[in-house]
Amino acid sequence: MKRSPEELETLFAKFNRDVKVYSRWFRLALVVDQTLNVVWLNGSQDETCSSHIGRKIEMGTATWFQRFVCKCLRKMETSHCFKSRGE
């Protein structure tokens, strides 16, 4: 799939912004999170575990363990799984 010059410009701008805004360690943690989403939850490579679990809870298809993980993440941030949907 060949991307248009406008699409490439948008991707490069996002890349440059992410490198400036987020630390290397944050970006590494994000990659690990997204990798776990693929391996553990069979989810998209562009989504975090908490986003995936938030959608599953909203659809009513989350397992007891996924609900437990979300409950643990609430201690870090209120409604973390729901706020992270789409990440």
Image (tube, rainbow, N blue to C red):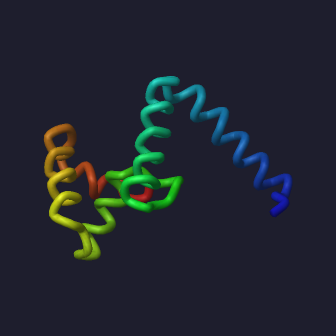
Residue found at x 43% / y 33%: 29
Residue situated in front as seen by the camera: 16 or 30: 30
The quarter of the image holding the N terminus is bottom right
Query: Total of numbered circles in the picture?
Result: 0
Residue 57: where, in percent of width, then height?
24, 67
Residue extending furthest toward the front: 39
Residue 14 placement, left or right of 83? right
Name above or below for residue 28 compared with residue 46.
above
Residue 26: where, in percent of width, then height?
44, 29
Q: Quadrant of residue 53?
A: bottom left
Residue situated in front as seen by the camera: 43 or 8: 43
Name above or below for residue 73 compared with residue 66.
above
Q: Quadrant of residue 63?
A: bottom left
Residue 56: where, in percent of width, then height?
30, 68
Residue found at x 20% / y 51%: 69
Residue 31: where, in percent of width, then height?
49, 39
Residue situated in front as seen by the camera: 56 or 79: 56
Name above or below for residue 57 compared with residue 45.
below
Residue 76 placement, left or right of 23? left
Name above or below for residue 86 compared with residue 80.
below
Residue extending furthest toward the bottom: 60
Residue found at x 20% / y 45%: 73
Residue found at x 44% / y 61%: 43
Residue 74 placement, left or right of 42? left
Q: Quadrant of residue 41?
A: bottom left
